Image (cartoon, rainbow, N blue to C red):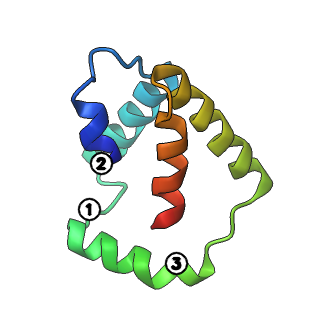
Amino acid sequence: MLWADMAGNEKELESPAWHGEILNEREAALNAGKVAVSSWQEAKERIQKSLMRVKILSTAESDLEEGHRFYEAQADGLGTYFLDTLYSH
């Protein structure tokens, strides 16, 4: 739901430069055959199996806090929605 909400306002949301850099790196790796592609169903199953082993490191917590601040600056309450969505799954 977060992405659906954001897609409605995509022209108003500025994506950080590093998002584009990461996407370009991942596309290059895919084109070079360095990564495997999974169906969404396979990815969901893999994620669900690993959920019990998820531990949020302090470095990741700071990234999540930064994400919260970024989305909250875009729209009041969006940062909280971002975190709620992540932690609920």
Is 89 above or below relative to 72?
A: below
Q: Identify the element where label 3 is drawn.
A: helix
Which residue occupies 38% across, 42% down?
26
Instruction: Answer with the quarter of the image where residue 39 lies.
Output: bottom left
Circle nearer the N terminus (1, 3): 1
How far separated are the C-alphas under marks 3 and 2? 26 Å
Q: Are marks 2 and 1 in contact (CB under 8 Å)?
A: yes
Of the pair 45 and 28, the residue shown nearer to us:
45
> Closer to us: mark 2 or mark 1?
1
Circle nearer the N terminus (3, 2): 2
Which residue occupies 21% across, 29% down?
8
Q: Which mark is residue 13?
A: none
Q: Amino acid at mark 1?
A: Val
Q: Can you identify the residue that label 1 sits on?
A: 37
Of the pair 55 and 19, the residue shown nearer to us:
55
Q: Identify the element where label 1 is drawn.
A: loop
Q: Amino acid at mark 3?
A: Leu
Q: Can you identify the residue that label 3 sits on?
A: 51
Q: Can you identify the residue that label 2 sits on?
A: 30
How far separated are the C-alphas under marks 2 and 1? 8 Å
